[in-house]
Image (cartoon, helix red, strand yellow):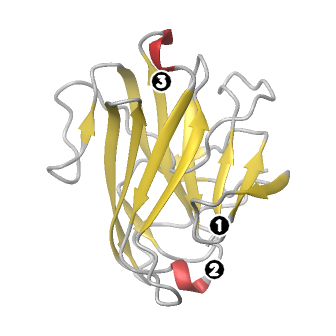
Amino acid sequence: MTISFSWAPCTGAARRFGHFLAAAVMLGAGAAFAQPSDFMGPSVQNLSVGLFCQPNVDLEEESPGSASGFRNVISAVPVHVKSTQTIDTRLGNTFGVQVRMKNDDHWGSVELRYTHPPFPNDGTTEQNLTQDFYDDWNVFSYTFDFPYEQVEGIWTLEAWSDTEQLFRISFDMVSGTGQAGASPRCN
């Protein structure tokens, strides 16, 4: 399994931004979420969820908290292509969260916790990573790179700054329906 990350504000600057979940139903206070447990904390200004374009990978770096032991680093923000929390598990699909904070209090190191049904190869159910937040939009996305990642069920991404939960978003993973769409190669 590959967890892909990149850090860069959506202004086009080449900073790295967290690519661990993907992008774009603008969720405000009182917005409806797909799961009752979904949450957007008071420090979050905007949150978008959905399907992204497949990113071009610039390099791989070690990531002991991921199932594969590495993550992809990208320098360009993936393009949001569909607002949804239902994702087809087809290889190459990239999904995630795009988030903007209200103030500078949480721009720094953030812990990402990603949970999912067990992978058939090793039973992995959780992946933990530390990621930097920047002063604009940040994207945390995940790309299905390997067949063992294609497990159906609820996948959840949480972000924490110290003891404050910033958000918790769930995705319903489905297989082979075609209804959820596919991530195109946009670049």
Q: Pointer 1 and pointer 2: residues touching (CB < 8 Å)?
A: yes
Gap in angstroms between the C-alphas marked 3 and 1? 24 Å
Q: Pointer 3 and pointer 2: residues touching (CB < 8 Å)?
A: no
Q: Nearer the viewer, residue 12 or 129?
A: 129
First in residue order: circle 3 vs circle 2 = 3
Gap in angstroms between the C-alphas marked 3 and 2? 30 Å
Q: Nearer the viewer, residue 101 or 68?
A: 68
Q: Nearer the viewer, residue 122 or 71?
A: 122
SS category of the residue bearing label 2: loop
Q: Amino acid at mark 1?
A: Thr
- Marks 3 and 1: which is nearer the front? 1
Q: Which residue is mark 3?
A: 100
SS category of the residue bearing label 1: loop
Whole-percent x, y for residue 33 in the image: 22, 45
Whole-percent x, y for residue 104 in the image: 50, 10
* Crowd band around label 2 with a 10 angstrom C-alpha radius: few (<14), some (14–19), many (20+): few
First in residue order: circle 1 vs circle 2 = 1
Which residue appears at 37% of the width and 32% of the height?
26
Q: Is residue 59 visible?
A: yes
Whole-percent x, y for residue 31 in the image: 21, 33
Which residue appears at 49% of the width and 80% of the height?
150
Q: Pointer 3 and pointer 1: residues touching (CB < 8 Å)?
A: no
SS category of the residue bearing label 3: strand
Which residue appears at 75% of the width and 26% of the height?
12
Q: Which residue is mark 1?
A: 2
Count of number-bearing discs: 3
Q: Is residue 20 left or right of residue 9?
A: left
Q: Which residue is mark 2?
A: 146
